[in-house]
Amino acid sequence: MLAQYLSYEFIALFMFITMLVMMSTGQRVFGAIGFVAAASALLIWGEGSVEMPYTAIWKLFKWYPMLTLPLFVYMGFMISESGIAKDLYRMFHVFFGGVKGGLAIGTMFMMIVISAMNGLSVAGMAVGATIALPEMLKRNYDKRMITGVVQAGSTLGILIPPSVVLVLYGMIARQPVSHLWMAGILPGLMMASLFIIYIYLRCKFQPNLGPVLSEDERNMPFIEKIKLLKAGIIPFIIFFLMTGLFLGGVVSLVECSAVGALLATFAAIHKKKFNKKIVEITLRKTLGISCMFLWIILAALCFGSVFDGLGAGKAIEKLFIERWNLSPWGVLIMMQISYIIMGMFLDDTAMLVIVAPLYVPLIISLGFDPIWYGVLYTITCQIAYMTPPFGYNLFLMRAMAPKEISLRDIYNSITPFLLVMLLALTLIMVFPEIATYLPEKYLG
C-alpha cells in the first residue's frame, strides 16, 4: 500500500493540504473531509478500511449527548420564528434608544441572549441580520459598524452556555460539560462587555455612527414600557431556568436541552404564535442545521480516525517539542495559530472533531488545564470565523445581510472587533482564573 513508500508524516500533511484545497474550490465541507478520509484510507490500508466509515457512524449514533444538538437548535429557531426575538429587540430598542449607539448596544444584548440560547452562531446571525440590521440602517447607523456588531455578537453563542461546541469538546476531551459551561460564563460576559464598551466609546466620539433615537420613538406610556419589558424578558427566564436546572444538578445535559425546547414552545403558545406555519418553518430549519452538523461530524470522525491511525498526534508532539524545541507556551500558541488558519476553511465542529483528539492529550501532558484550554479553543474559533478572506461568518453574513451591505463592507467592519477578541483571548491566557474560577468554586 501507499504507506510502504511514503512516511506517515508526509501522508498526514498531504491529507490536510488536499482537504483545504478541495474546500477552497467551494466543495461542501463534509464532502471534502469525507472524500479525503475515505480515499486516503483505501490507498493506505486497502479494502479493509471500508469499515472505518461504518465504525464512525455507530460511534456518532452512540453519542447520547448529541441529542442536545437538535433540541437547542429547535429552541433558538422557535424563539426567533414566534416573534419572541422581535419583542426582545423592541425592548432594547426603547430602553437604549436614548444613548449614543444605543441601538447597536441593544443589538449586542439581543445577540448575546439569542445566540446563547441557541448554542450556535447561526440563529443569532439570522436574527441580527433580519431584525436588527434593517432597523439600524433606517435610523442612519453606520453600516460597517453595525455589520461588525451582528457578526461579533453572534459568535458568543458558542461560548456562553448552553454552547453546543463546548458539549462536543467535552465529549471528545472527556471533560464534564457542566465545568465547561461554567468556565465559559465569565469569559463570554467579559468579551461581550468589551464589545459594548467599544461601541459606546466609538459612538461617543463619533456620534454620526450611532445617532440617538428621536423623542417620538422613545416616548411611550409607562404601562406600555412595563408590557414591553414583560414580553422581552421571556428569553431570559427560559435561559436562566434551563441552565440553572442543569448547573444545579437537577437535570442532565440532554434533559436540560429538552427543558429549553419545551419552554420555548410554551412561550410561543403563550404569545399565541404556535401554529402550523411556525412549527413547519422551525422544524425544517432545525432539521437542516442538525443534518448539516451530523454530516460534518461523521466526515470529521472518519478523517480523525485515519489521521490518528497514522500516528499524527505523536508526529505533532515530536514536531513541536523535539524538532522545533518549543516551550509549553510556545506549543500552545502554535496550536492557536493553527486553529485560526483552519478556521478560515472549516467550521468549529469539523475543526474540533479533527484536531481536538490530537491536541488535547498533548495539552494535558504539558500540564495545562483542559477546561481552560476548551475556553481558549472556543474563543480562537470565534476569531477564525471572522478572519478574512475565508472566515465562515463573513460569507454567512453576506448571505443574510440587506442588499446595501457589500462583502467589502463586511470585511471592513470586522477589524476592531477582532482586536477586541484578541485582547480577551490574551487576558484569559495571562489570567486563567477568568475561566477556571467559577467551575473550581462551585463545582470543585
Image: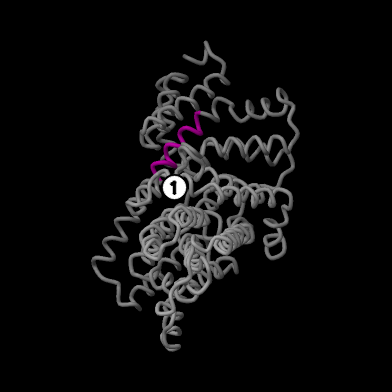
| Residue situated in front as seen by the camera: 324 or 222 | 222
Amino acid on which the number 1 mark rests in the picture: Ile
Residue at 75 percent of width and 34 percent of height: 327
Q: Is residue 302 magenta-colored?
A: yes
Q: Position of residue 309 (x, y in %)?
A: 54, 27
Magenta residues (range): 294-306
| Residue situated in front as seen by the camera: 14 or 431 | 431
SS at mark 1 in the image: helix
Q: Report the residue marked by disc 1.
A: 410
Question: Is residue 255 at least partly visible in the picture?
Answer: no
Residue at 43 percent of width and 19 percent of height: 43
Q: Relative to residue 440, is residue 16 depicted above or below?
A: above
Q: Position of residue 285 (x, y in %)?
A: 32, 55
- Type of secondary structure dominating the magenta stretch: helix
Q: Quadrant of the C terminus?
A: bottom right
Residue 318 figure quarter: top right
Answer left or right for 41 relative to 178: left
Tell me the colour scheme of the image: one colour
